[in-house]
Image: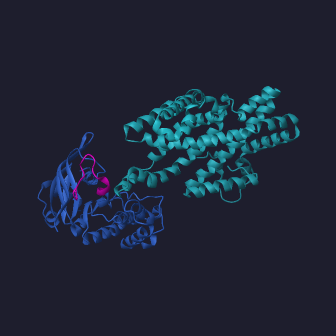
Amino acid sequence: MSVSNPINSKKRKEPGIMPISTRLKILPWWALFLLFLGVLLIYAIINRENYRDAFDFIAPGLQVTLTASVIAFTIALVVGLIMGMGRISSNPITYNIATFYVEVVRGIPMIVIIIYVAFVLVPLVVQGANSLGNLILETSWLAFIEGLGSKLSTMDITQIDPLVRAISGLAFGYGAYEAEVFRAGIQSIERGQMEAARSLGMSYFQAMRHVILPQAIRVILPPLGNDLIAMLKDSSLISVLAVRDLTQLGKLNRSRTFRTFETWNTVTYLYLSMTLLGSMGVKILERRLQSGEAITTSINNVFRQLRQSLSRKQVID
Amino acid sequence: MSEKIIEVRNVSKSFKHVQALSNIDLDVNRGEVVFIFGPSGGGKSTLLRCINRLETVDEGEIVVDGIRVTDAKPDLDSLRAEVGMVFQLFNLFPHLTVVNNITLAQELIRKRDRQEAYEIATNLLKRVGLPEKADAFPDQLSGGQKQRVAIARALAMNPKIMLFDEPTSALDAEMIREVLDVMMLLAQEGMTMVVVSHEMGFAKAASDRMVFLADGKLVEEGPTDQLYAHPKEARTKAFFDQILY
């Protein structure tokens, strides 16, 4: 839910044309000030060489940050859905695996998770691939996949790009949080829905797919949106793997030019431009979902409204 | 043809510390309308939910049309296809239109194609008096309309038995009649029905047998004409005194 300006609620109840004093109080000053700073920065980037230099060096990191976040988040959603369903499973095996994953991963700082995945889990996977490859090569009746076998057995850790490891780490870490979002969303759907579906003869999975999950998604979307924005910020942690994202390029620029102000103002501004846009999108989505709009229509309308508001340079409260 | 379609043998069930059902014996014949009544918490809903295995029993046996419900792994698919259930709180699927509520299970389980399922759905909506509501969403309907859609939804699966768990208890007074009318039609068409309710008028008009359940025990049961006018047990008499103003 968006936190509305408390001043609004007092004044809006009066009918008639709003006096100027009220209009002044209602304006989102924080956003206007932020916009002003942004304009200042754009001016600086255009006219000051240090800023332009910093921007040219750092801006390519935007692509890495965005790519890493979006791919990692998509994987985290898949992991989250599977683990979330495991968390509500009555099967002791799936329940315990899912709970172990969620409890452990949520108990470790994200930066440690990324390092752990990059330097412990991924190497383990590579070792496992090596063993599997050797097994294939040694087994005569598996000769038809010999090519795959030799590729697997000679896989080397250095072949795995740091970006791939970083994305794996982010996905692994966020999957646990998304699992809980899915679990809570599914459990928020009243029991009667499952009972009605089962009474009609649907299996558990049919009921989930056609009755429960479609309803749960409406509940789940806003938290997921917020988590995507959180991941945009946490993606800065992949800089510890020397991946050239916004933060890493910021660090490199600072050590290259010693211009801390220009560097970090630019990095901050670039992160803010992503996260604030994202937050606006989530708020619009929330509002549209509340008014009962269909989900796909809501998402389409969010993009439409964002585009409109950006072109008119308005800030939606 | 008088043949037992539901057999409940010595069924007991408890929830943690509460004995919900104690040694219940009950038979329902094909085409019969059985009306189960009694004070709140008496075990009526629990018994109904045990019949289609929404709850499991601790002791005893339930057989529905040859299917042993109380087995460790019963043939749930067959069971639930034969037994339709109507809930007190309707439990319509809010994200689907009325007609899609009715066609969903048909397509998934009876494997009917969209055309056939749609036709069956619209016919059933006519039968329950709501043909114009096909493309409405559940939240646009009144309580009575929702319940009639719920009945249509259950009927779409061509069940042999219909279970009603206090179908009118959540409805405003003026909407109770429209739902009972539909149930009456079903009874006249020969559907086997087990109804848990407080609507004694309906019991008198539509049911063949009445069963009085209190504190998890079957206190009395018998043909409606007899039991309604001349209840044998004191407990039954006391209950009638309380609810019939």
Query: Is A236 positioned to the left or the right of A252 in the image?
Result: left
Q: Is residue A9 visible?
A: no
- Pick out the residue farthest to the left: B232
- B67 drawn magenta: yes
Residue A139 to residue A299: above or below: above
Q: Position of residue B139 (x, y in %)?
A: 47, 61
* Stretch of the chain drawn in magenta: B64-79
Residue A39 to residue A298: above or below: above
Q: Position of residue A5 (x, y in %)?
A: 65, 46
Query: Is A44 positioned to the left or the right of B171 in the image?
Result: right
- In this figure, what is the number of numbered marks? 0
Residue B126 lies in quadrant: bottom left
Q: Position of residue B232 (x, y in %)?
A: 11, 58
Query: Is B72 positioned to the left or the right of A243 in the image?
Result: left
**Model colouring:** by chain
In front here: B211 or A94?
A94
Write the residue at 61% across / 33% down: A165
In front here: B171 or A162?
A162
Query: Is B150 positioned to the left or the right of A315 in the image?
Result: left
Q: Is residue A41 visible?
A: yes
User: Which chain gets the blue colouring?
Assistant: B
In front here: A207 or A163?
A163
- B95 drawn magenta: no
In front here: B146 or A116?
A116
User: Which chain gets the cyan colouring?
Assistant: A
Q: Position of residue A252 (x, y in %)?
A: 76, 29
